[in-house]
Image: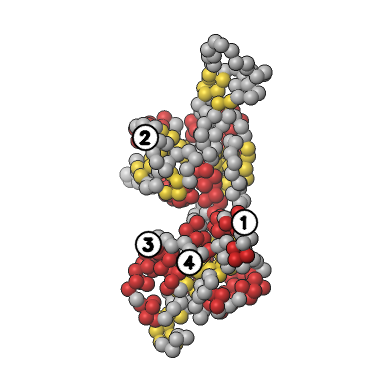
Amino acid sequence: MRITLGVTGGVAAYKAAELVRCLQQNGFTVQVVMTRAAREFVTPLTFAALSGQKVITDLFAGSSSGEANLESAIEHIAVAQRTDLLLVAPATADIIAKFARGIADDFLTTLYLASTAPVVIAPAMNVNMWNHEATQENVKTLRARGVHVVDPGEGYLACGMTGAGRLAGQEAIVAAVREALKAQRDLEGETLLITAGPTCEDLDPVRYITNRSSGKMGFAVAEAAGRRGAKVILISGPVNLETPAGVERIDIRSAAEMHNAVQARIAGASIAILAAAVADYRPSERQTEKMKKGAASLAISLEPTADILADVAKNKGRKIIVGFAAETQNVAENARRKLVAKNADLIVANDVTAEGAGFDYDTNVVTLFSRDGRDLALPKLTKSEVADRILDEVARLRSILRTPAPARLSNV
């Protein structure tokens, strides 16, 4: 498990060096991110030597020398994608306020906004700063968003005052880390088969029929499922996306190839999330030579492709099956009809004409239609956030659908 440790500018920063060792002894790999103020108390070299990892100190590496490049400009995204948990210890009043208000003016604050991993903060500051209404309001905001807060201890502080504000002990911080990771690994033991992206149905060696699917939604689900402990098999059409860490990827091109790949692997899956935008039709005949343009109109005969969702759900047994419905009108009506017709457990539906939803966007606006009658409309969220909400609903349905019904008592 990989932890990113954010160290901010307080006297307790020196204790973060001991915390690195403690985390390593508990089996974690640690990469340190330091704020500018933290470097006034401890040098990056200290953490580099202890962690054996690069210490990140600037949002744009080399910016002071004019050597910043694209890699450094997006490094916070790369770190966000590979971390299993973000821990900030010590967390100053300043960093807590920035997290609460969404301010992103350095690497650590930008990483916080870019990451979907669980977050643990261990505040350390003067007692009056800790008790201030502004700080308490910011802490309350972060707790409401799911951030795990390790309350500071009480005692004699570096400023000479006595009260709450001391950095919590290493054992308490590590325990909070373990608890946060445990809460997020609710899919351990599950094997998820996920489809993503478009399919391409060839007309001839040059031309083909396809759609605008980027694959981003399916890949986001695959990444989130892996982070939550599942074994993930990702079957993808042609997309320009990197494979999420730890995910088994199978590349296909046509609807027939995707159908075959799914059928070959569905037996070993406990959950199927079919997010791919599979072509509904393909050319009845593929030309072996390029079709030449002529003056006359051209008519192309199309035939339906295999219905992957229906075929998977037909004999699903105890599997949980999730389908997607990209609609342009009557979204709720069409989604509920599809839920029943395909024998699915959950349909993720959206209006692809809505702003910030559908193909190519990094955001989505969806409604989740569940087999048990629950409709959950989500606001515009990043596709990573939508992925976690889908998996939350899958976990909820799992607990309902896989719980044996109470045995009926016979009259004696």
Residue at the (48%, 63%) spot, across then down:
105
Q: Whole-percent x and y of residue 337?
A: 38, 31
Which three-letter amino acid code belongs to the residue tagged 1? Asn
Q: Are marks 2 and 1 in contact (CB under 8 Å)?
A: no
**Does residue 234 appear in this view?**
yes
Q: Earlier in the sequence, mark 3 or mark 1?
A: 1
Question: Residue 406: image x %, image y %?
Answer: 38, 47
> N-terminal of the two: label 2 or label 4?
4
Question: Contact (CB < 8 A) between labels 3 and 1?
Answer: no
| Viewport quadrant of the N terminus | bottom right
Mark 4 crowd level (few <14, some 14–19, many ≥20, 10 Å Cα): many
Q: According to the image, label 4 marks what residue?
A: 120
Q: Is residue 214 above or below residue 184?
A: above
Secondary structure at numbered mark 2: helix
Q: Which residue in the protein does label 1 denote?
A: 69
For mark 3, what is the residue? 144
For label 2, the crowd category at 10 Å Cα-Cα, with few meaning under 14, some 14 to 19 and many 20 or more, is some
Q: Residue at x 36, y 34 (%)?
A: 331
Q: Which dot, 4 or 1, sits closer to the camera?
A: 1
Disc number for residue 331: 2
Kind of residue sitting beneath label 4: Val
Ranked by sequence position, the earlier of labels 2 and 3 is 3
User: Element at badge 4?
Assistant: strand
Identified at 56% across, 31% down, the residue is 199
